[in-house]
Amino acid sequence: MEFDTITFGSHGMANDNLSAMEAKPKGSASLAAVVSAFVPTWVTGFIFIAIFVFIRHRYPNIYAPRTFIGTISEKDRTPSPARSYFDWVRTMHKVPDKFILYHQSLDAYLYLRFLRTAIFICLVGCCITWPILMPVNASGGGSSTQLDMIGIGNVKNKGHFYAHAIIAWVFFGFVMFTVARERFWLIGLRQAWTLSKPVAKSLSSRTVLFLSAPKDALEERNSHQFFGEGAVRIWPVSKVEALESLVSSRKSKIEQLETAEMSLIRKAYLEARKHARKNNSQNERPSYETLPDPVKKSIRPRHKPSTSPLKEKVDSIEWLREKIKKEEEKIEDARNAYEVGDTNGGAAVFVEFRTCAEAQRACQQVTSSDLLALGPRYINVSPNEVIWNNLTIPPARRISEEGSSIAIVIATIIFWSIPSGIIGTISNISYLADNFQWLSFLKNLPDPVIGLLSGLIPPLATSYLSKLVPTIFRNIFKSFGSPTNTAAELKVQKWYYIFQVTQVFLVTAVFSGAASVAGELMDRVKDPTSIPELLARQLPKASNFYLTYFIVQGTTSAADNLLNYSDLLTYLFYDYFFDKTPRQKFIRYTSMKGIAWGKLFPKFANFAIIAIAYSCIAPLVLGFAAAGLSLYYFSYRYNLLFVIQPKIDTKGQAYTVALQHLLTGVYIAELALLGIFSLRSATGPSIIIAILLVVTALYNVLTNKYLTPLEQFLPADLATMSENGDESTPLLSSAEEGRAQTTSRIQRLGQRAHVPQTVAQRALDPIARFFEPHVFASYDAMRSWLQDGDAFEDEEDIPQYTEEQLQKAYLNPALTSPTPLIWLARDPIEVSKNEVAENEERGLKATDQGAWLDEKGRVKWSVHEFGEVPVWKRGVRY
């Protein structure tokens, strides 16, 4: 696209305002860019899906582990009656999203709900804006062509802007209501979920982590003094760095020993076969005993220890056995000598309470008069998500590290503008060719090539760059004091959202509109009141970029989620070239793909933010966003049903944060419209949008004021009910609940109007459920909803713990972890049997059960019989 030059100054603003709004593309290439992006991405997407369908059943551990793998309990596996090419389509059609809530995690279900909510907002936005704003824009009197003709940039008549202002009130009001409604719904669900027996009885729901614990709070006899009468057990945490180092070293040497022994076993078996063939003894089975002594000696692995003064090679197996035994002794001595010394506030304590309600109260109350003691605190912390090294940081240092991490993250976001801005500039090929002599050759490129350069490559580059950021942020927060993986992930979500909005949306949109705008950014910082003007100038011009962005993301990326070729190639590469022991094979095969909430929620919140921001400027963006989000919803639904095992559960906090992020799109849209109307001196529409902006800010403040406490804590009245056992009272079925909802005004109106029951159920009930969340998203209603549709709160779902499990639950693993079992593969010439016996003689537990060498010397293990795998046992659900 080519745009006229736009200048702004303190004088002659009226004329400049007009030129700003009339800066239309000369010979718009918007349609060509969209088509150029559409064709290759859809072709790529179809190729990816075809490959996925063809290879899916050949690699079930990559594409459908949740249907069979032993690490998933039988009741939580996704039903899959057959392994045909399209059986997964039938399963996805029959299995509802609610299945994921019961058999995976609350976050997994809420993530799909978030995508559905974003799609719903976009579709309703299309229904509201397209019939009115597209005709208004097309008849606005401008000279735009192709897709630009239905954007707000084509409007010259100031009277037309009243339509945009009124539609903004309708659509943005709908968005705000939907966000508030979803927050109400989530509050009810989290309360019902938290007080359900399987969750309320779990140890993590009754345990609170207190950081910066004083030394007295680490003693059992003082637990009631610090934490109240409800405290029943504490697990103090202090520094054990030396012990952690020893345990880590022991684990590493066990793995090295397994590698060395498997190397010996494999070489011995192959040499025995070779020896038997040389002697032409076809009837004689290969035997280790028949090997010559020099051969036996040559196949034993040897290495030069780094600590050896003479640097002579030693027998690796014997050396590792000796080192492991010495480290076992050191570990045992360190554990026996372990005691909580002077911590200087650099300690933490896990406290178990009798009930979930008492734990909630303890988490909310002020526990100590010391300003920095026993805080911050966390509830619902599972032992496997704790970052143990970060629990023993003194409070002053923790504050310092938190500030440092935020400063580094902010610097990363700011300096990321450089590559992001370059990408946006590249998308404006015509501008570059006109303003840079050495790029004038771009004018001579064929139209399809220009469309490809401006329509496809920038979105792909933007997508690739943005993928790196969450990992960088996550490493920063984990390295700077986050006590749990969940806490770090929530920080990633909040800051990655800022990155997405500023870099993927605003900076790219500004630079895409005009490559010369970089110099103006500093001026806008000095004069924030001019920000609406900047948005008004640049956002309309960048709409085509986001049309292609949604196409690229919704086709290739969603199809890539299904094909997941990176995980497949990684598995095949390591399985063939590097994994040579049964343990390595087992871990590689059973390591299920996780999911990063801190990365995904901001990404798709930004999708919705962009769509909302453009809803009244370029309404077509809403449709493309809905299509892209729908494809993503399909791909993630498949992955959550068949592939993914979440490693982090925020208990719905990520969804709450993501919902609030959606309002950013409303603010940006309102500021942009205010700027557009001001530039055109449309006084009436400007006043209407200014009032809407104030209303939006008031709405945001009030909803946060009244809903945030309910989102963070369990209400005292519900906690009391749970303590009195009221949560066990029978619940209404969904049908009975519908008849019993006498407080629903919409349903009462339907009854008074004698609306037929079938019409009421199909039309009025969904409307009532949407517009009356205070009724249908209440605690009682959500308890009933949880009970409807699947087995929930079965006795087998309620966790039971042994005393040993409770004693070790929140102790640092360095204090409790035993020496790992040495797992070898059984071989036909029984070398493994000899190695197991030698390990046992040295006091090292070993076995060759559940794994074996095949005829070609390849390691196999009991994939379908996890009961035979000696290094696996079902984990405890804390």
Image: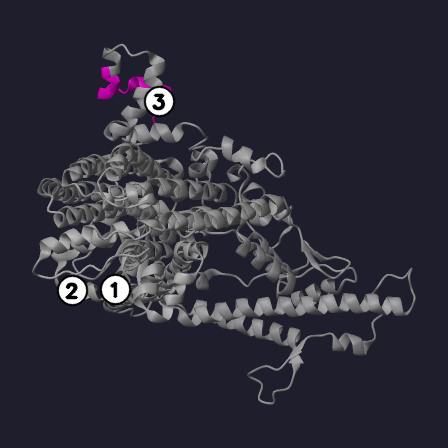
Name which of mark 3 and mark 1 comes first in the sequence. Answer: 1
The circle on residue 732 is 3
Q: Is residue 125 left or right of residue 157?
A: right
* Foreground tag (3 vs 2): 2
Check residue 739 for magenta coloring: yes
Q: Which secondary structure lies at badge 2?
A: helix
**Residue 564 x/y as whole percent:** 53, 51
- Give the farthest residue toward the left: 11
Q: Is residue 577 left or right of residue 473?
A: right
Name which of mark 3 and mark 2 comes first in the sequence. Answer: 2
Residue type of the residue flagged with mark 2: Asp
Task: From the image, tell me which residue sits under label 2.
Answer: 523
Please name the residue shown 32% across and 20% down the image.
763
The circle on residue 228 is none
Please name the residue shown 37% across and 65% down the image.
389
Task: From the image, tell me which residue sits under label 1.
Answer: 516
Q: Which secondary structure lies at badge 1?
A: helix
Magenta-tinted stretch: 728-749
Check residue 177 for magenta coloring: no
Q: What whole-number distance in Å separates the C-alpha atoms at marks 2 and 1? A: 13 Å
